[in-house]
Image: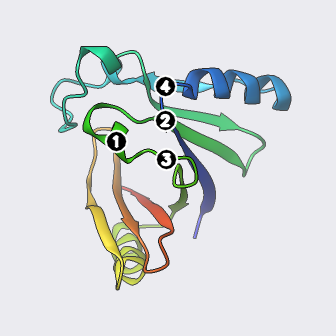
């Protein structure tokens, strides 16, 4: 395994939260809004109302620790509830390891987004394990 991070989800306050965290940890935000995603990215339409929401934020704390996050958008807004607004993000060495870990974690749970190649140049998937913990697994292409 390469790194493990916490991934937080917000209902429209991701930018505000990450600006606060950047202040606290004296670091800079790396971010992309839904409007900035490529048109052919395969992402579902989030509607005009959510285009300015954060699709992804990363806040490096040091060389090995980062907090990541995004705003829910579109149809996913109804699923957002405080308490289920996090995932554990795990970077692994390669696609084979990503498939193995994803299969193990989703066994008895739920494959939310099966691993596939993404426009941000990684192999990525999301699942919930049988205990309800949400996981994001990524590997380099």
Left or right, 38 with respect to 5, comes to left
Q: Which residue is mark 3?
A: 81
Distance Cα–Cα, label 1 vs label 4: 13 Å
Distance Cα–Cα, label 2 vs label 3: 14 Å
Distance Cα–Cα, label 2 vs label 4: 9 Å
Left or right, 68 with respect to 122, comes to right
Q: Residues within 10 Å of mark 3 (few under 14, many from 20)?
A: few
> How many numbered marks have been drawn onto this rendered protein structure?
4
Mark 3 element type: loop
Quadrant position of residue 110: bottom left
Residues at circles 4 and 3 in contact by the CB criterion of under 8 Å: no
Lower position in the chain sequence, tag 2 or tag 1: 2
Mark 2 element type: strand
Residue nearest the viewer, comparing 69 with 50: 50
Residues at circles 2 and 3 in contact by the CB criterion of under 8 Å: no
Q: Which residue is mark 1?
A: 78
The answer, for residue 141, to whether it is visible in the render is: no
Q: Which residue is mark 2?
A: 70
Q: 124 above or below 45?
A: below
Lower position in the chain sequence, tag 2 or tag 4: 4
């Amino acid at each position: 395994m390469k790194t493990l991070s916490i991934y937080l989800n917000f209902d429209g306050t991701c930018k505000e939260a990450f600006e606060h965290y950047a202040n606290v940890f004296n670091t800079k935000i790396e971010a992309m809004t839904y409007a900035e995603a490529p048109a052919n990215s395969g992402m579902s339409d989030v509607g005009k109302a959510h285009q300015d929401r954060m699709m992804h934020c990363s806040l490096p704390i040091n060389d090995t620790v980062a907090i990541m996050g995004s705003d829910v958008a579109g149809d996913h807004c109804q699923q957002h509830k405080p308490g289920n607004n996090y995932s554990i993000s795990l970077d692994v060495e390669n696609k084979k390891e990503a498939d193995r870990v994803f299969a193990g974690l989703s066994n008895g749970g739920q494959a939310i987004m099966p691993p596939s190649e993404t426009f941000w140049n990684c192999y990525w998937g999301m699942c919930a394990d049988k205990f309800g913990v949400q996981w994001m697994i990524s590997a380099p292409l």
